[in-house]
Amino acid sequence: MPLPSNATKPLVLVFPCAHTTNYQRCLVIAQHLRPFFEMRFIHTDQQAHLVYQQGFETFNGNFFPLLHYLIEEKLPGVHETNPELMFLEQVEILETLQPALIIGDNDYTLSMAAEFTGIPIISVMNGYQSPYFANRSIFHSQFRNYEPFCRIREKYGLREKNSIQEELEGDLNWICDLPELFPQKELPYHYELIGPLIEVPRPSKATGIEKLSSFKKNILIDLDDTKPVNWLEVLDTITCQGYNLTVRATNQNPKLLHLRRTSSCINSAHLFAKADLLVCNTEGLLYEALFYGLPVIFKCQFAYQERIIEALEYWQIGTSWSHTTSTVKKTFDYWISNKRSDMHRTLQYKLKASLNSLGSKLLQSITLHFPYLDRLSVPVSK
């Protein structure tokens, strides 16, 4: 059940894209801001339990299914009515709840709603989504149809923008990656590198780990199992060849059930210390893997994820699944032998330093850019 409202703190509404990864990283932000703000999250049936487990409230909205028109490469181009409906519902939410501040994570209409209502917005983005990303841009054919947004901006008297990438921008923009993995050009005042948004991993009791053979290497598989997983069928041939397979997936996808005969879980934090390799098709656990020195084999779902593979291969801490299909066992063995490499240790040092200063970076950033939030009392480190 939602918690009672705390009227003594300024209200912040959080609008993550409706994926577990986006909710989890926004929850990390909310944990750090909790002492100073009342944090509420947009409700989705799939992610609400994560919000309630952390002790936060939700608010209702009905526009999340429309997000797929903006981010799915294989669906038709953006339909004007869909982003307009999203925009109008967000405006209604903001005018009803009157937050002091809003935080968006990969929400392509929220900046329009924020501008229309005059409410300041912080945008959370990956390093490869930044317009100042030092390598080539991700915004090409899958985001090709910007015209509907132009018409919405013209219709409602909003200032002109020129691209979907600009729609992701807020009054303040937090880049939540290590610059070593996703380097940036010189950033303007309203862009800040805050680093990865993960909780500092802590040892926890291993539940079910005793079922895994101690004589086999442990492969952790992290899936957005709403997507096709036929590519995993090749793992059937190696489950008895020296590997334990543990699937982290939340949906009951029939194509995953054959893998779950080894072990399956939703919360896999306790498995990292014993894992030897991460196989994934979502970036949700990349930094957790880095924290423990695990190599990563990544399966692309979208073109923008090519930037992730480029970073893994540049630092020699992982590779693409497309390089492994014909020689899975050989590739697995090669990367397992590179666990906790010198490259891992270099990035681990950067990651731990970033996590240790995350809370102070978030609070100082807000007080610097939004000083009129005079109820907020934040100690500023020198």
Image (tube, helix red, strand yellow):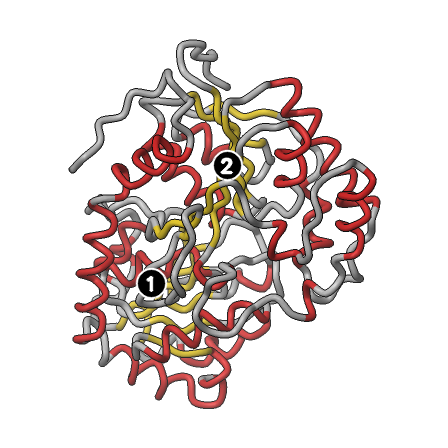
Q: Is residue 136 above or below residue 169?
A: below
Q: Position of residue 279 (x, y in %)?
A: 41, 69
Query: Which quarter shows the C terminus?
Result: top left
Q: Are marks 2 and 1 in contact (CB under 8 Å)?
A: no
Q: Quadrant of residue 158?
A: top right
Q: Nearer the viewer, residue 261 or 307?
A: 307
The first of marks 2 and 1 along the sequence is: 2
Q: Specify the label residue 51 is tagged with.
A: none
Q: In front: 85, or 340?
A: 85
Q: Residue at x 21, y 60 (%)?
A: 350
- Location of residue 308 in the rendering, given as x and y in whole percent from the top left corner: 44, 69
Q: Seen in the image, is 35 located left or right of residue 52?
A: left
Residue at image location 83% in from the left, 40% down from the top: 155
* Residue under pointer 2: 103
User: Residue 116: where, in percent of width, then height?
Assistant: 68, 32
Q: Which residue sits at x=75%, y=32%?
A: 88
Q: CA distance from mark 2 to mark 1?
A: 22 Å
At label 2, which amino acid type do we have? Ile
Foreground pick, 43 / 78: 78
Badge 2 marks a residue whose secondary structure is strand
Q: Please, what secondary structure does the residue beneath circle 1 have?
A: loop
Disc 2 packing (10 Å; few <14; some 14–19; many ≥20) = many
* Residue shown at 43% from the left, 50% from the top: 191
Q: Position of residue 197 (x, y in %)?
A: 36, 48
The amino acid pointed to by label 1 is Pro
| Residue identifier under label 1 | 179
Quarter of the image where one finds residue 138: bottom right
